[in-house]
Image (cartoon, rainbow, N blue to C red):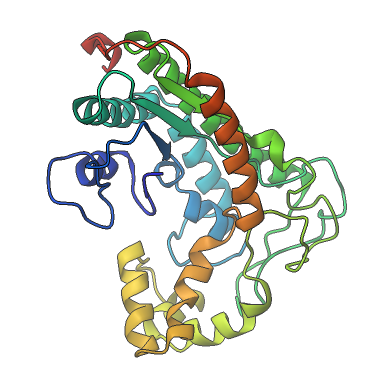
Amino acid sequence: MVPCSGDMFPSIVQKQFNDGPPTAKRPIWGNRPDFITLSMGGNDISFKQLVTECVYSLPVFTLSNCDQVIADSQARVNSPQFVTDALQVIIAALSKGTSRVGPSFRVYVVGYAQFFNEQTTQCNDISFKPSWSPFARQYLTIERRQALNEIARNLNGALRAAVTRASIGAPNRVFFVDYDDQFDGHRFCDRHEPNPNDPDTWFYTLGADEAAVGDFLNSIPRIRGLLNGQSDKTLTDGEFFQLITEAAAGDELKASYGILVFRVFHPNPVGHRAIAARLRSVILATRALPSAIASVNKTETS
């Protein structure tokens, strides 16, 4: 799988599919892989801001209120440009693979799971806001869960549309992998919340490290200013991790707290095994299909 952590569509193309030397974010193509999997799009619709603002009440990466973040994310994922940008990544991956491997090379675009059971009522009065955040609680009402799930559904729809367009010029070579149903019964609010130790929930939360993470973040002046509402200068991903690294001063545990913040609402190991199982079944079902050399018409990319 191509590592796209923190990247948006343009940077994926720039970093991962040019002819520069291999790096941490550029695959090594010398072993002639049969296929590549892509997980992308979340950063392009401000996934991190959705979670930190609308679930955890942590205005570190955005100063917009939750309703505005949701509206902006929906506008982005529903725009024709989103599909066009995703298509450019698929074409870049397909072209690179074809040049190195040949016309048998395939691309599998992996979708996203909805985060919540949006029908239950036990979460209506529940918030994931850490005790050390001074900001107002964001309650996981049915309406809030529906809004966030709708973004995930629309994101899958947009990625599927990009795959469909790519397939016009590359039949049987580009596939969308939908694993959302694998998470039925394993989403937030399927049971009592908050329950960070629930083995049947397949997403990460801050969990038992919440208090330690809060103490550490509040020890960093620039982050403390944001958490206390005393600053209007939000952080980029790079700035956040640089501050964490500098403050940790070689302490590996503290240095890991940045990852704990960024991994929330991502699938945990059990969830990833379910994703891998669905991906494997799709690969096995499609590997025998006849393929043709990719020839995506330019009008399909505009």
Residue 120 at what x, y percent from top left? 86, 45
Is residue 15 or residue 300 the one in the foreground?
15
Most extreme residue toward the left is 20
Q: How many marks?
A: 0
Is residue 242 or residue 228 the one in the foreground?
242
Residue 78 at what x, y percent from top left? 48, 27
**Quarter location, residue 100:** top left
Q: Where 5 falls versus 97 (above or below)?
A: below
Quick one: quadrant of the C terminus? Answer: top left
Residue 109 at what x, y percent from top left? 45, 31
Residue located 55% across and 59% down the image = 53
Residue located 38% across and 79% down the image = 244
**Quarter location, residue 231:** bottom left
Residue 287 at what x, y percent from top left? 47, 21
183 to the left or right of 262: right
43 to the left or right of 199: left
**Quarter location, residue 125:** bottom right
Residue located 78% across and 63% down the image = 198
One can see residue 121 in this view: yes
Is residue 268 or residue 150 the one in the foreground?
268
Q: Where 186 falls versus 283 (above or below)?
A: below
